[in-house]
Image (tube, grey):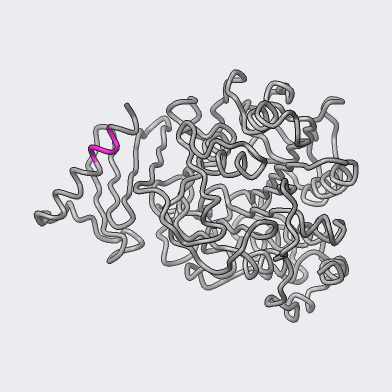
């Protein structure tokens, strides 16, 4: 395992084609009571851009992410929010956005919310050291006090994006300083150094800004897209988007390679996208209006894969999950006994069996022009817009929401199921 990841430090484009994706790299029967937890969040990376999902025909070459996926569980029915800030807030608080006020990109999370990091510390006697490296985007573009959120170490970007991946501002305890290194590499360097300093279990929230715009040309050694020219408007953005994902994957390989064999075997790895792919680079079967920024499946049904310590099975799981559930799940992994709190329900049981989880999924969005809510029972999905027209879909027959059942009369069963969803939506928002 260690040798495999070390080899990735010397990736050149051709090696992307021959890396094994089937070696049993991340499973281990040697699991300590309180594993390290590595949560990796990719920015604007939907299922259509992720290896192993049916959506999309053009995929980046990501041997490290592939390895995590091939040796862990892929959760195919995981709902987030349509944009980045609400997804991050839902994970860090275990609450739906209407409870915290974070319902759209750029909304500010109040510092009196009990964060996941603080909750773990309060309930485990400070068992874990915590860090958040990379994109924050929960305090506007202003600084925040990491201590308020129980975060021992923070270093990253405050806002939603950088204007230039090679010229950007890094904020940490020392203030804000201009950087000239590639963001994904700098964040990975910081992660490697912080992990190396730890002498107790750790929880690292690593939030890359990749592959969020601007489209750009990463260092050639990190991707397989060839000699790209500088990106300009009108040029096909897809190779640049793929290159940013591959560069991020390259850096994930560096981090995993930096861990000792024992440390790697005692680390739970969660990799996820925060919302769907942006429409400039989205792929079929998603429509341009059904990806990032929307409550359609292409906007909120995001990739998440979990592997490593404590994960005792492999393959696909179709249980209904939401991003709030990561709060209780990660807390329970850290030793907190509570399996359900706020809007969060731990799915740690799914690491070992394919039992059911939720009966309903919920998401929402509130932008200057829209207040919308979505709820699903796994088959039927209801989208309600304030002052607008309801949308009702059968996801089993129409998984990409091409036919609104409201355009024709509903059957008796469909009308009953819609009423059930409406009642549950009222209950959730009560």
Is any part of residue 235 visible from this angle? no
Chief SS of the magenta region: helix
Taking the spot 75% from the left edge, 52% from the top edge, the residue there is 32
Q: Nearer the viewer, residue 374 or 257?
A: 257
- Residue 129, quarter of the rendered image: top right
Q: Is residue 429 left or right of residue 252?
A: left
Residue 163 image offset from top left, x and y in percent: 71, 41
Residue 364 image offset from top left, x and y in percent: 40, 38
Q: Is residue 297 inside the magenta stretch?
A: no
Q: Nearer the viewer, residue 204 or 85?
A: 204
Number of callouts in the render? 0
Q: Is residue 284 left or right of residue 216?
A: left
For the N terminus, give its image quadrant. bottom right
Taking the spot 51% from the left edge, 52% from the top edge, the residue there is 276
Q: Is residue 425 inside the magenta stretch?
A: yes
- Residue 64, quarter of the rendered image: bottom right
Write down the region rendered in magenta. Answer: 422-426
Residue 335 image offset from top left, x and y in percent: 65, 40
Q: Nearer the viewer, residue 187 or 288?
A: 187
């Amino acid at each position: 395992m260690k040798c495999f990841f070390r080899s990735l430090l010397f990736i050149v484009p051709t090696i992307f084609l021959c890396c094994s994706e089937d070696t049993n790299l991340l499973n281990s029967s040697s699991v300590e009571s309180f594993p390290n937890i590595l949560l990796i969040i990719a920015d604007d990376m939907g299922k259509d851009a992720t290896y192993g999902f049916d959506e999309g025909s053009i995929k980046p070459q990501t041997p490290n992410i592939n390895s995590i996926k091939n040796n862990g569980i892929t959760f195919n029915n995981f709902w987030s929010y349509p944009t980045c800030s609400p997804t991050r807030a839902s994970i860090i608080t275990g609450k739906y956005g209407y409870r915290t006020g974070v319902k759209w990109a750029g909304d500010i999370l109040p510092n009196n919310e009990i964060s996941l990091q603080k909750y773990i510390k309060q309930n485990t006697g400070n068992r874990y050291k915590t860090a958040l490296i990379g994109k924050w985007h929960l305090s506007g573009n202003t600084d925040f006090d990491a201590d308020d959120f129980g975060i021992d170490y923070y270093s990253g970007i405050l806002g939603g994006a950088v204007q230039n991946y090679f010229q950007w501002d890094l904020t940490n305890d020392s203030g804000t300083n201009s950087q000239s290194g590639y963001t994904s590499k700098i964040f990975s360097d910081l992660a490697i150094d912080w992990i190396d300093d730890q002498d107790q279990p750790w929880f690292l929230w690593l939030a890359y800004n990749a592959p969020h715009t601007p489209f750009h040309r990463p260092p050639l050694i990190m991707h397989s897209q060839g000699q790209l020219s500088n990106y300009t408007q009108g040029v096909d953005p897809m190779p640049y988007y793929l290159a940013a994902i591959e560069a991020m994957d390259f850096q994930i390989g560096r981090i995993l390679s930096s861990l000792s064999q024992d440390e790697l075997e005692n680390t739970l790895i969660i990799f996820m996208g925060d919302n769907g792919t942006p429409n400039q680079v989205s792929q079929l079967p998603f429509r341009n209006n059904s990806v990032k920024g929307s409550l359609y499946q292409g906007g909120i049904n995001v990739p998440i894969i979990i592997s490593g310590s404590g994960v005792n099975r492999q393959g696909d799981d179709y249980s209904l999950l939401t991003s709030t559930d990561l709060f209780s799940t990660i807390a329970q992994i850290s030793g907190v006994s509570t399996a359900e709190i706020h809007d969060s329900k731990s799915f740690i049981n799914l690491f070992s069996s394919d039992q059911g989880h939720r009966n309903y999924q919920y998401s929402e969005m509130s932008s200057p022009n829209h207040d919308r809510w979505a709820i699903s029972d796994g088959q039927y999905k209801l989208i309600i817009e304030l002052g607008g027209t309801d949308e009702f879909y059968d996801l089993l027959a129409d998984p990409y929401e091409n036919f609104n059942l409201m355009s024709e009369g509903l059957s008796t069963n469909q009308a009953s199921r819609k009423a059930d969803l409406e009642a549950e939506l009222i209950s959730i928002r009560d």
